[in-house]
Image: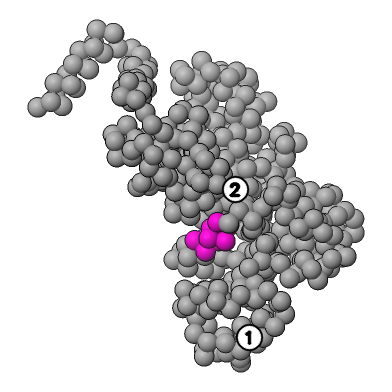
Amino acid sequence: MNKPILRLENVSKAYPGFALRDVSFELLPGYIMGLIGPNGAGKSTTIKLIMNLFPLDAGKITVFGLDHWEDEIRIKQQIGYVGEDQQFYGEMTVGWTVDFVSRFYANWDWDYCRELLHRFGLQRGIKVNHLSKGMEVKLALTLALSHRPRLLLLDEPTSGLDPVVRKELLEELLEVVQDEARSILISSHITDDLEKIADYITLINEGSIVLSQTKDYLMDTWKRIIIKDRQMVDRLKPWLTFLEPGSGGRVGYTSNFLELKRVFAPELEAGQIVRENIDLTDLMSAVVKGRVNNVDAGL
Amino acid sequence: MFITISENNPVPLYRQIVEQVTRQIILGELRAGDPLPSIRQLAKELTTSVITTKRAYQELERAGYIYTRPGKGSFVAPLSPEKIESFKREVVREHLQQAVKAANKVGLEKRVIRELLEEVMEGDTE
């Protein structure tokens, strides 16, 4: 039960002008992981490598305990994948598309598929190129879910969708993990509301993993620190990963608030130092712009 | 069980859940033996992560408000009237501590704090 659904060990892949280096992380059954990072960080490459869309240079990917290269067929029967762009036959109908895709899966669940089509308001008779962007994503998700995959890989699925549709997708994804056996990996460069539902966050920058942790732990340990008392600036400097430009060293981010809280308890109490909660957008910019060597990464 | 959480609230999400469940138990809105939604069901209802709701339930369990039966789910723990009384005291004590802290910060004397407490209580009973 607690064997990881997905495990990457020291995965590397180089192209001209880009390299993914030593990427390692794992995802346990029943959880949702957000893979975040700026554009070009390597999120899509990571997901495409898991999907075996091109070969690894080095490392190992294990899905459901199976080797992703040798057992590709068995694995793919239990993976659902939604890529950045939906590749459909535009002249064909929703119904034709669903029938077409269903034939590739031994475990296609027609009841569930019809339920999803109904819930998403997708009519079988409508031509795919008449669908809005939001409806296209819903169709892609229906196709990715109808064989009840154990691992769902979503590559930037919500970019370009309105908040109402995004909310619907989030609820559907939380429905997927209800039985504690399935996992979801979602990539996103805009840290939008998708991260609300993420249990784990893996942050990737310039082809390397910066951190991979539960979101709750990140929110506990990363804080924005405001130094009200100028004389404290030097003492706090080693604790801060990234100083906000223009703040004269008085506003920065710490990745080690639990320790800082102990060392500077009196100063926090007296208001000489103030801490604020941050969100994942702040975290991403702190890490991307900050001195990454200071980051207590990936424990 | 009715719970709402907000990302804009500086209190961590799991604490928001803990506080609301605790309040409902203390006020008797939730009674001993009442079933709670599963960790995953609650995450879905609140559109939040499973780990967040799990952490809230662990905290509630540690504090003795709820108990969990493997495979059956989580339930409100039976609490004696004395226990409820002591929980009530604990909750109010925490709030008063905050108030005293604030008073100390602006340098109010103990005498003034007591006066203010009286004043607030008088105001409330009208």
Magenta stretch: residue A174 in it? Answer: yes
Residue B51 sits above or below residue A137 on the image: above
Q: Which amino acid, mark 2?
A: Asp
Which chain is disc 2 placed on?
A: A
- Is residue A82 something one can see in this rendering? no
Residue of label 1: A99
In this view, the residue in front, A6 or A2, is A2
- Is residue A255 something one can see in this rendering? yes
Which chain is disc 1 placed on?
A: A
Residue A75 sits above or below residue A105 on the image: above
Q: Quadrant of residue A95?
A: bottom right
Mark drawn on residue A199: 2
Residue A238 in the image: state x and y as whole percent.
68, 25
| Residue at 36% over, 46% down | B1
Say which element carries label 2: loop
> Which of label 1 and label 2 is nearer to you?
1
Residue A36 in the image: state x and y as whole percent.
65, 53
- CA neighbours of label 2 inside 10 A, class few (<14), some (14 to 19), many (20+): many
**Callout 1–callout 2 Cβ contact below 8 Å:** no
Q: Which amino acid, mark 1?
A: Asp
Would residue A207 be found to the left or right of residue A133 on screen? right
Q: Which residues are magenta?
A: A170-178
Residue A98 sits above or below residue A66 on the image: below
Would residue A118 be found to the left or right of residue A22 on screen? left
Q: Quadrant of residue A56?
A: bottom right
| Residue at 63% over, 47% down | A200
Residue A191 in the image: state x and y as whole percent.
57, 54
In this view, the residue in front, A243 or A47, is A47
